[in-house]
Image (tube, rainbow, N blue to C red):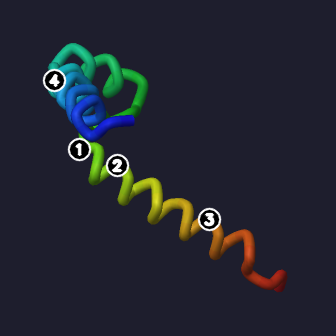
Amino acid sequence: MSAELRERIGADLHAIGAGADLAGRFNAIGMRVRVTSPAELQKIVMDERAALARYTQAPPK
């Protein structure tokens, strides 16, 4: 995916996520809306992958 398209999609999602309507709907079911940039999301995903890899490779106790 091109960087331009990624940024455009990110901006659209940010605009939707920043709306009070969506936040209210998610809050009503106990969830929180968190809107990030594409770069921030990539870091979150990479950090989660690394954590999961550590958990799945840990020796059994």
Q: Is residue 56 above or below residue 46?
A: below
Q: Secondary structure at mark 1?
A: loop
Cα distance between the residues tagged 4 and 3: 31 Å
Q: Secondary structure at mark 3?
A: helix
Residues packed near mark 2 inside 10 Å, few (<14), some (14 to 19) or many (20 plus): few
Q: Which residue is mark 2?
A: 41
Q: Which mark is residue 37?
A: 1
Q: Is residue 61 left or right of residue 38?
A: right
Residue ID at (39%, 35%): 1
**Label 2 with label 3: CB-CB less than 8 Å:** no
Residue ID at (22%, 34%): 4
Q: Which mark is residue 10?
A: none
Cα distance between the residues tagged 3 and 1: 23 Å
First in residue order: circle 3 vs circle 1: 1
First in residue order: circle 4 vs circle 3: 4
> Which amino acid is tagged 1?
Ser
Cα distance between the residues tagged 2 and 1: 6 Å
* Screen quadrant of the C terminus: bottom right
Cα distance between the residues tagged 2 and 3: 16 Å
Residue in the foreground of this view, choosing between 44 and 3: 3
x and y percent of residue 20 in the render? 16, 19
Q: Which residue is mark 3?
A: 52
Q: Quadrant of residue 7?
A: top left
**Label 2 with label 1: CB-CB less than 8 Å:** yes
Q: Which mark is residue 15?
A: 4
Q: Is residue 47 above or below residue 54?
A: above
Residues packed near mark 4 inside 10 Å, few (<14), some (14 to 19) or many (20 plus): few
Residues packed near mark 3 inside 10 Å, few (<14), some (14 to 19) or many (20 plus): few
2 vs 3, front mark: 2
Cα distance between the residues tagged 4 and 2: 16 Å
